[in-house]
Image (cartoon, rainbow, N blue to C red):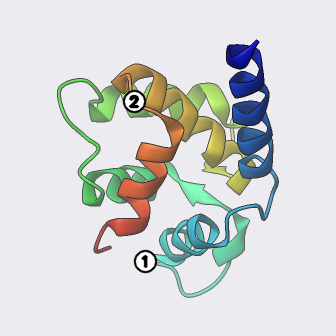
Amino acid sequence: GKSSLAAAIHFKIMAAYFDEVGDLELRERFDAYCRFGKTTDAHSGLTNKNLFKLMREASLIDRSLSSTTLDLIFVRIAQRGAKKITFFEFLQVLQQCADIKNISFIEIRNAIIQANG
């Protein structure tokens, strides 16, 4: 039926997003925050601190998504003991944030793209 087609289309869209370079604007924003406060080693990933800065500047931190909750998501998604997340892990973090806030991945993505970071 129509709903299964919609689900299939939605899955295709999400699959495109979850491609490493599927979203250049989001990738550029990720890279910009990886570089924040660093002179070198920018592409090795996004720190917890800079993830929080990115989310706060996109007005995504509130009662439903606190800094503590974001910390927990970061630790859950990051490789064990890692201080930084990759772009692919960042997408997973955003999906979990979307779930907690009860909004879509696309809404989170757009808030980040439109933020004046």
Work out which quarter of the rendered image holds the C terminus and state it: bottom left
Amino acid at circle 1: Gly
Classify residue 38 as left or right of residue 44.
left
In the foreground, 63 or 114: 114
Q: Residue at x 43, y 77 (%)?
A: 37
Mark 2 vs mark 1, CA separation in Å: 30 Å
Is disc 1 placed on a helix, strand or loop?
loop
Indicate the position of residue 28 as horizontal and vertical percent values.
Answer: 59, 75
Residue at the spot of label 1: 37
Coordinates of residue 103 in the picture (x, y in percent): 39, 30
Marks 2 and 1 in Cβ contact (< 8 Å): no
| Image quarter hosting the N terminus | top right
- For the image shown, how many numbered marks are present on the structure? 2
On residue 85, the disc is: none
The residue lying at 76 percent from left, 61 percent from top is 22
Q: Nearer the viewer, residue 22 or 5?
A: 5
Tell me the crowding category of disc 1: few under 14, some 14 to 19, or many 20 or more residues within 10 angstroms, Cα based: few
Q: Which residue is mark 2?
A: 103
Q: Estimate the x, y position of residue 13 in percent, counting from the top left.
A: 72, 44
Say which label, 2 or 1, has the lower sequence index: 1
- Residue 86 seen in the figure: no
- At x 48% / y 69%, what residue is drawn? 33
- Direction from residue 100 to residue 116 in the image, left or right: left
Residue positioned most to the front: 1
Q: Position of residue 11 (x, y in %)?
A: 76, 32
- Tag 2's secondary structure? loop
The quadrant where residue 44 appears? bottom right
Q: Which image quadrant for residue 64? A: top left
Where 60 sits versus 43, above or below?
A: above
From the viewer's perspective, is 107 left or right of 94? Answer: left
Q: Residue furthest left?
A: 63
Q: Nearer the viewer, residue 39 or 97?
A: 97
